[in-house]
Amino acid sequence: MTCAIPPDEASLPRAVTLRVQEKTIDMDKFVIRGGNPLVGSIRVSGAKNSALPCMAAAILTEDEVILENIPQVRDIETEQKLLMSMGAQVELGYGRAQHRTTISCRHLSDPVARYEIVKTMRASSLVLGPLVARCGMARVAMPGGCAIGGRPIDLHLKGLEKMGATITQEHGYLEARAERLRGTHLFFDKITVTGTEDLLMAAVLADGETVMENCAREPEVTDLAAMLVSMGAQIEGAGTPTIRVQGVSKLHGTRHRINPDRIEAGTFLVAGAITRGDLIVTNCEPAHLGAIMEKLRESGARVDVQSEDSIRVRAEEKLSATDISTREYPGFPTDMQAQFMALSTQAQGVSRITENIFENRFMHVQELVRMGANIAVDGRTATVQGASQLSAAAVMCSDLRASASLVLAALVAEGESILDRVYHMDRGYERIEEKLRGVGAQIRRMGNVFGSRATSEE
């Protein structure tokens, strides 16, 4: 194992410090003129929420890891910067490289996740488990608050402590150390996707068997487990509440293809329905979209699985009100709540949308109201009176999925809407304006071209 262990924060080598130049993209806006039904075929990119843990999993081996179907989004660029700041070599290939990423973590000279990178993406905490497992230590900046609610990593830390790690906190950093993690029995007090992923990565190199109970069942967890198995890990039960891991001493490199993004696919299905279009969503996984398709059908949309990787959506009749209650997979995903709220504004009747995962995920409500929606919020439930005639307005994007809901609303609003702070959308949707324009949307980007810049200083 070639991992350097710095003795303290003051002596950490800073030969290369990466800085994200956010000002170049924070001024971007979308200008959307509503009224066009979306017709044609639209392709789904790889899942950002699968790609991020799979990139972190490359830490577990000295060999080269190749990941395919990587989406071209800001969070992937941030993960690249994070890994490179530790000494890894990361090549992001798009275009001819077909969204392929090559990662080599042979020499991890600096196993630290610094605040200037962690603060821009909470998934950065996913390097904690693999760093401790591979290097015997990890120093990760505490992620702080989140616009849609707290995402504490207490469950990550509790699990690592049970596996023998010593956890300390100082100067805004969490440090975990262990000569070698040991297998144990873990029970998650609350279902957590990132916690399941982080501790799964830690367990694959632990000494002995680890049994994890009340695990997240999301496809992103299953995708990570499939990658780890292809690297030589011994895992049973991924995709069920109980996962068993028999630790091994070493993992090897692999070539793995990332799952399609089920949330992007769901967003496009809603786009087809809300605009009364005829849209075929391709390169998706219908098996991952059951709850979304069911609610679309309840709303009156016609949804047909065309093939093993494509779904057709049409809304020939008026949409009807439907109640939504977010749950862990396979329930209705919290990441689709905002998009369905936009759809509910166009449905006849009263829809009740209950958010059970995050405590502050109704930040899009006030912006939808500015466009003419009739929505009242009481605690974790939003009541939507439809159907409303939305009108164009200048609105502000507050987080990734809220941004998507405002795009959907603007697609049916009368007039020309301006969406500010669309860098939130760039975190998780690959060039969405180009994809939507290809099926008839009147949408254009104003401001700087997508893509953050990084500079290095000696």
Image (cartoon, rainbow, N blue to C red):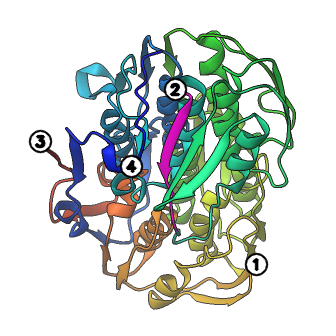
> Where does residue 369 sit, x and y in percent of width and height?
51, 89
Callout 2 amino acid: Cys
Q: Residue at x 31, y 27 (%)?
A: 90
Q: Residues within 10 Å of mark 3 (few under 14, many from 20)?
A: few
Label annotation for residue 98: none
Please say if 37 is above or below 432. Answer: below
Please say if 217 is above or below 386. Answer: above
- Residue named by callout 2: 135
* Circle 1: element type: strand
Of mark 4 and mark 2, the one earlier in the sequence is 4
- Residue named by callout 1: 352
Q: Is 79 situated left or right of 135 in this image?
A: left
Q: Residues within 10 Å of mark 2 (few under 14, many from 20)?
A: many
Callout 3 amino acid: Glu
Q: Is 449 situated left or right of 328 in this image?
A: left
Front-most of 443 and 90?
90
Of mark 4 and mark 1, the one earlier in the sequence is 4
Label annotation for residue 458: 3
Q: Quadrant of residue 4?
A: top left
Of mark 2 and mark 3, the one earlier in the sequence is 2
Q: Is residue 440 visible?
A: no
Q: Residues within 10 Å of mark 4 (few under 14, many from 20)?
A: few
Q: Is 242 situated left or right of 25 in this image?
A: right
Residue 136 among magenta residues? yes
Residue 162 among magenta residues? no
Label annotation for residue 9: 4
Callout 4 amino acid: Glu
Give the magenta-colored segment's residue range: 135-144
